[in-house]
Amino acid sequence: MKRILIIVVFLILPINAIDYTKKPEVQKFIKIMHYRYGFKLKTLNRWFKSVRANSYIRRLRQGLYCGNVPCSMLGSWDRYSYHYLKRVGEGVYFMRKFRKTLKRAYRRYGIPPEYITAIIGIESNFGRVRGDYFVFDRLTHLAFDKRGRRADFYKKQLIALLRLSAREKVNPKDIRGSSSGAIGLAQFIPSTYKHYAVDFNRDGKTQMNNVVDAIGSIANYFRKHGWRRNQPVAVRVKYEGLRFDRLPTGYNHKYYRGELKGIKPREKFNYYGKVSLIKLERTYYDELWYGAKNFYVITRYNHSSYYAMVVHQLAQKIKREYERRYGKFK
């Protein structure tokens, strides 16, 4: 008796995939991407037919300890800054390795190399950590599972991501980034590339994961947001008491220094414009700082006083250690 071999073919889709092509608004989006930007309908339907239900990439996490102390026992600034401010040695190595590129960025844009280095260190840990999400899937969820202005914003980011992936000839389904869709060493959101990313290595491409392009793009971003060459960023000040609540603090509140009675810089501060008061809540007291115009520029990268301050402090630590090892940056 003859044996009959039966071959069964399975269509393998990602585990827990969602078919977004069933949504009318996604079909409308697909047609826009096809007719306006030239994407193939077959390709778009394949991408949207298998959107990961959970776009989060699971990683092993360290315990929430700051040294030998649970971070929860510390002040909010101590918790926020602890892990970032340990990246000094890697920052010095990065500055040394890419000193020619950083020097060129300084000549062209006027941004000190230590601040560009600090941004890359904080945003992507010098390229090692570029996000915990699959960006295409994450943006699809945000764009089509919600309504209102935020959904419209994420649709624009999804359009920008697809156009960016086409220019760079990469599969958008493979791109990893943050929960808001930020990608690459500099963690630009997709729409930011159009306005601020530059082809700094002159290879005809603006690549999200190229170190040289990232350096030039960060410098260009700061310059276009008003960075003032050779002006200070911030200085710590002294005041009476351990906690400060006498005046509103934060980068959006500006003061003439003459108005700030009893508040004085702890070191020389050659700056004569308005300043903001930046309060860092430590475990047993508040640190208070003056923030200058360049401090405000850093907050355009991330709208947080703590973020801008950790960039500033990491940059200054990297600069001091670099000079200790190698002398002035040249």
Image (spheres, rainbow, N blue to C red):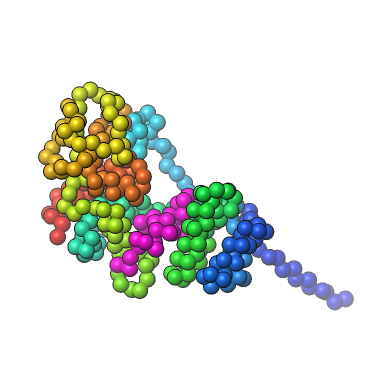
Q: Tell me: residue 22, above or below residue 89.
A: below
Q: Is the magenta stretch mostly helix, strand or loop?
A: loop
Q: In which quarter of the image is residue 213?
A: bottom left
Q: Quadrant of residue 52?
A: bottom right
Find out whether residue 308 is within the magenta segment.
Answer: no
Q: Observer-nearest residue: 132 or 187? A: 187
Find out whether residue 198 is within the magenta segment.
Answer: yes
The residue lying furthest to the top in this view is 241
Q: Which residue occupies 57% across, 70% down?
A: 34
Residue 31 in view here:
yes
What span is in magenta?
A: 175-200
Q: Observer-nearest residue: 214 or 294? A: 294
> Could you tell me which quadrant the C terminus lies in?
bottom left
Query: Residue 324: percent from the left, percent from the top?
Result: 14, 50
Query: Residue 54: percent from the left, percent from the top?
Result: 57, 51
Q: Observer-nearest residue: 28 or 239? A: 28
Q: Which residue occupies 34% across, 30% down?
A: 75
Query: Residue 72: percent from the left, percent from the top?
Result: 40, 31
> Could you tell me which quadrant the N terminus lies in?
bottom right
Left or right: 303, with 13 as reference point: left
Left or right: 24, with 204 as reference point: right
